[in-house]
Amino acid sequence: MKAQPLEFEKPIVDLERQLEELKKHSKLQGVDLDHEVEGMERKIEATRKKIYENLKAWERVQVARLVQRPFALDYLELAFTDFTELHGDRLFGDDQAMPCGLATLGSHRCVVVSHQKGRDTKENIRRNFGSAHPEGYRKALRIMRLGAKFGLPIIALIDTPGAYPGVGAEERHISESIAVNLREMMLLPVPIVAVVIGEGGSGGALGIGVADRILMLENSYYSVISPEGCAAILWRHRSHAPEAAEALKLTAGDLRQLKLIDQVIEEPIGGAHLDHEKAAANFKAIVLAQLDELAKKSKKLLLEERYQKFRAMGEVLET
């Protein structure tokens, strides 16, 4: 599925159109334009690099939401091996918005909990657009407890606009299910690595986001509210979403500077949607390095450092 160009990508699209014209002219006229073609390709690459290195917050939100980006199941296929999905929360049912199971990353046997969106209407309905119900979070907790029982590290792949706010979810206590996950993840005596691979929306993201290491892909975002929701509250109109995105400090770079996340995972030039394999390779290398480091720590040290990590968040110094 080819991505529709975003507004800020128009200079790249124009250059790509010129490149196609060059190739077409070379073929039809039998003229050797290899030198010109190579120069245009270099120009496109340089333009794409310059644009993506200087994206504004709202532009990164737009990239994070692209359906062409690799989703959780894509990373499970490209970076992990032996993924076996486990279903159901043993209380109500299964939630297709949160695939969970056992997998292997490098030499680490682990459990994976994740959000999964769809790429078309049919799949989005089945996955509920990546917005999980209470049974999804309870399933994730069941799988994480299973991992803790057998000493397996936990990897959480976060990609959701938020937990599902519908009547059924409220009736089955969505807030309580997320709150229990926050409490229980703080106490699990195994390494936990959480990675925001796309959208990190509010409590829906936090429900599997309590971790020893919190990582973000370069063009993902992590926020207490969507830019549109913030704009509707503060400016009374969603058209102010770009201003809200800047004010929320929701990009990976902003959150790394604020010490709310631990590391930014570099994406291929132009975004992860242009090269799933390279994005997955970068993801795998960084997560493996974090797991290797965390595996050296004792359970007592792991829990103490996790506690102190979250206690330190939001500290304000007054002079």
Image (cartoon, rainbow, N blue to C red):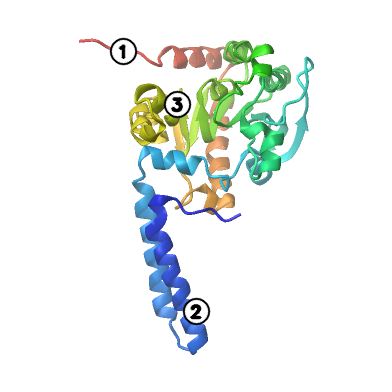
| Residue highlighted by disc 2 | 24
Mark nearer the N terminus (2 vs 3): 2
Q: Secondary structure at mark 1?
A: loop
Amino acid carrying label 1: it is Val
Residue in view at x 53 percent, y 22 percent: 212
Pick the front one: 98 or 46: 98
Q: Secondary structure at mark 2?
A: helix
Compute the Cα span from label 2 to label 3: 46 Å
Q: Nearer the viewer, mark 2 or mark 1?
A: 2
Task: Tell which residue pokes out farthest to the bottom in this image.
Answer: 30
Dividing the picture into quarters, in which one does residue 260 lie? Answer: top left
The location of residue 234, given as percent across then percent down, is: 35, 22
Amino acid carrying label 2: it is Lys
Pick the front one: 83 or 3: 3
Amino acid carrying label 3: it is Gly
| Residue highlighted by disc 3 | 229
Q: How many marks?
A: 3
| Residue highlighted by disc 1 | 316
